Image (cartoon, grey):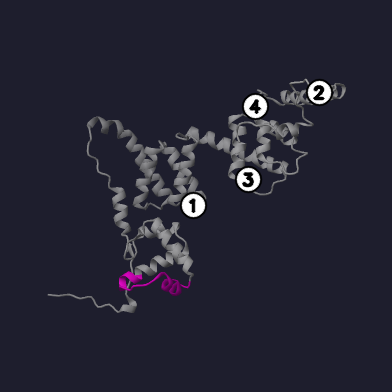
Amino acid sequence: MKFEKKETPVFSEICLPELFISEYLPLLSSDAIKVYLYIIYASKKGIEISPLDISKRIGSTIDFVKNAFIKLEENELILKTAEGYIINDIREIALNKLYTPKLTSSLEDANENAEKNVNRLKAINMIKNSYFQGVMPPTWYTDIDMMFTKYNFSEEVLISLFKYCFDRSALNRNYVKTVANAWYSKKIETLDDLERYYINYEKCSDIKKKICKKLGISRQLTQYEEAYVEKWLTEYNYDFNIIDLALKQTTSKTNPTFNYINKILTDWNEKGLRNPQDIKKYLTDFSTKEKLIKENKKQTKPTNTSNFVQRSYNSLNQFYDNLNTGGE
């Protein structure tokens, strides 16, 4: 007995797994999504079609289509072959990521990890119910397990990570992993670590704003400029009062750079100057010393037999211009 399903071609359906909506949709541009849907349609119909044909069909440029193919490959939705492309089964990909065979086990291991597993399960359920409406895509379980293992995050930190990304409307895997890597680089493992990080982050953000205001900078600081500020705060342990003294040394500079300011603060740090009073005394003594050297030069005629020349500077700016702090 043979059964056939009657289907009018124009009304036939193309089904997508829910995984595509939950996992891949946030990662793709609109052009990549259109290309993906069209190549699924073409594969179902058995149509051979070129990127140029696709660009005409979806109303996009050939460059956008080519970039879309690159993005689809990066996200493992398609696989390039000698003949063309294979559209991967994303359900199989998710299953392979979830299935990790455990070859050995012991009662001691189970007892040791029992409490940890219970706490982790509670954390996962809280994340699932709070940020995924009770239905979390399977691949997130693998990512969460990796964060526990690789980053040694506590349950509270992991929940805070998902809240941080959710509050910024960026609950996609790439962004979550980026934030997780950033926290790991800051040695965040416990909730106390995270709270200290937030306090330092707020302090650093406030000082960055003050520096920008003092220097008349209306743009965002570059990654390298921010690294300088973090070094002054965390490595040198300088507060804004001391940084402000360094900024005042740039008043005669047309476009003072952060590298120049860093030379000043590095010099002070290496000389063990820890408070504004010591720094002001150092600046005064430096100016007095240079003034005396200049006066002595005027009164002393140079001789050809001199083997040593005292180097002097017209100002502190000239001194710092020629200073090598070893960080360049």
Frontmost of labels 3 and 4 is 4
First in sequence, mark 4 or 1: give its number: 1
What's the amino acid at mark 1? Answer: Ala
First in sequence, mark 2 or 4: give its number: 4
The reply to whether residue 7 is in sight is: yes
- Badge 3 crowding class, 10 Å Cα cut-off, few under 14, some 14 to 19, many 20 or more, is some
Write the start and end of the magenta stretch as one range: 41-59
* Callout 4–callout 1 Cβ contact below 8 Å: no
Q: Which residue is mark 4?
A: 269
**Which SS class for mark 2?**
helix
First in sequence, mark 3 or 4: give its number: 3
Q: Residue 223 versus residue 277: which sits nearer the camera?
A: 223
- Badge 1 crowding class, 10 Å Cα cut-off, few under 14, some 14 to 19, many 20 or more, is some
Write the residue at 46% across / 42% down.
181
The answer to whether 129 appears left or right of 275 in the picture is: left
Q: Which residue is mark 2?
A: 293
Q: Position of residue 156 (x, y in %)?
A: 44, 38
Q: Position of residue 62 (x, y in %)?
A: 47, 69
What's the amino acid at mark 4? Answer: Asn
Spatial CA distance of label 1 from label 2 is: 61 Å
First in sequence, mark 1 or 3: give its number: 1
Q: Which residue is mark 1?
A: 170
